[in-house]
Amino acid sequence: MSAQNSKTKTLFIGLDGCTYTVLDEMTRELPDVGVTMPFLARLLKGGVRAKLRSTPNPLTPPAWTSIMTGKNPGAHGVFDFIRAEDKGGEVYWTLYDSRDVDSEMIWSIANRNGKKIAALNFPLTAPPPPETSGVIVPGFIPAKHLRRNSHPSGLFETLKSEIPGFDPKELAWDFDNEKQATEVLSDEETYKWVSYHLPREHQWFQVAEYVLKTEQPELMAVMFDGTDKIQHQAWPYLDPALLKNDPSAHDLRMREVCLEYFRNVDDYIEQLVKLCGPDVQVFFASDHGFTASVEVLRINVFLEEKGYLKWAVNDGSEQALRREASDFANLDWSKTTAYCRTPSSNGIHIRVANQPGEPGIKPEEYESFREKLIADLKSLRNEDGEPVVVDVLKREEWFPGAHMDKACDLTLVLRDNGFVSIRNIQPAVVKRPTPAGTHHPDGIFMAAGAGIVAADMVERRDIRDVCPTLLYSLGLAIPKDMEGKVADTFFTDAYKAAHPQKKGAPTRKSQRQAGEDMDASEKQQIIEQLQMLGYME
């Protein structure tokens, strides 16, 4: 082990999709398994934990952006993987990137207050904002863009020359590898999918270790995203409620590779924490939790049944065939008043005719139309008579801010927290043959180290609280326009007395810059990735 790094005050480890359902199992003694994550178990005995309530639609891009900004999607402007524009006769789409984030991120706030930062594998950090100094290696981009979007210039070449076995294809999203699972998820392909994330997380650990040793940032942040990805495909082997009493050879093999993943992550956490030294405050957070989805709601089929949309007629032309096979709802836009764009959005857009002759409802009809739509949605029952949609969120109530109008008019909360389907397949509601992993609104928020209270589980926090809590750990003032609050119950009374909270000037607008966009084939690769994880179809 190298010498301890006394300069890193705050270590932030993101665990995408991590949930106490799994983490509690990994940090306790299990028959014939032992403790899978012994270091984390020991660390948390002297620390604190809380459930972390995610964004209204608990989805990776808006949730991580809320963690990085301390604001809700209505303020920061990110709602989905896909940003779409309804032009009346057609809907156009592109992928969100950092230029769509309309709120200052923690990296910039810390930088301009004199703190050196490192942010590794966080989504929507490419291209790096021009005002950011420190180290940024973005996540959720193809390998060829990793070099151009790593900051500072030349960092990628340095990592390649200094880290043994450095492989950008493993570090980034290797779409050619990952899309193998898009067609048929056979037993072997499922095993390979989980196995693939073991060396990938090791790559990110090696980068984090190198940056921590050489740069000694005051805020060191790294996100491990395999937790989310393997849970999407291997939830039945991780949820204790779904483990079989008589597992097959494949079940045992899958269980073991999942445990191996968490053992490895525990080792990475231990090495990073020890490298930071005894005075570090270490925080963990996830963008959402996980649970089991047991049914499928084909929302656009239901909306057609209620007269809100019409499917496009396939005339057999090449264009019609392409549209029908596309990743979005293939609709007759002239006869559609409400529809869902993507499964990941879990939301419904209402089409309003702002100009005479445009398709959609009249502006003055909006409120009455929306109330009828809400009533129709809440009336939907499955074959057991249970309500499928348990809540319908209005955008002005849940997404306040300058970008509220970009949110879905209505966001659906399903009884099993699942994502909707937008496919044109009957019936509208169907039971899944086996439970599938899906997002739960409650993730994790944990802390340990110097000045952190030993309190086990405390009250639930909001996802917007992560950013101000990290700023407080760094000794910085909390911008007065930040929506989140410092998790003050995470800190000892003595620490709070010695470090009173300070309110600071508002956050600043990011100076957006032009960046290299992905080409059509790269965008399609990302779509295929999202398909495999269940966010798109």
Image (cartoon, rainbow, N blue to C red):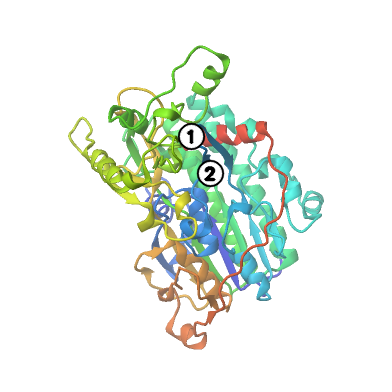
Q: Is residue 472 visible?
A: yes
Residue at disc 1, secondary structure:
loop
* Foreground of the two, 87 or 107: 87
Seen as rendered, the residue at the extreme front is 356
**Badge 2: residue crowd in 10 Å (few <14, some 14–19, many ≥20):** many
Assign the N terminus to one quadrant of the image: bottom right
Q: Considering only vertical position in the picture, is 113 above or below 25?
A: below
Residue at mark 2: 81
Q: Which residue lies at the image location 59% right of the left edge and 33% below the top edge?
A: 178
Seen as rendered, the residue at the extreme left is 385
Quadrant in the picture for residue 192: top right
Comes first in the chain, label 2 or label 1: 2
Q: Is residue 288 left or right of residue 144?
A: left
Residue at disc 2, secondary structure:
loop
Q: Considering only vertical position in the picture, is 443 above or below 275?
A: above
Q: Is residue 415 visible?
A: no
What is the C-alpha distance between the residues marked 2 and 1?
A: 10 Å
Where is residue 80 shown, x and y percent of the image? 50, 46
Q: Is residue 288 left or right of residue 428?
A: right
Q: Is residue 96 left or right of residue 207?
A: left
**Badge 1: residue crowd in 10 Å (few <14, some 14–19, many ≥20):** many
Q: Is residue 371 left or right of residue 461?
A: left
Number of dots carrying numbers: 2
Q: Which residue lies at the image location 50% right of the left edge and 78% below the top edge?
A: 451
Where is residue 209 shown, x and y percent of the image? 68, 59
Contact between labelled residues 1 and 2, with CB atoms less than 8 Å apart: yes
Seen as rendered, the residue at the extreme bottom is 498
Residue 536's tag is 1
Residue 429's tag is none
* Foreground of the two, 74 or 231: 74
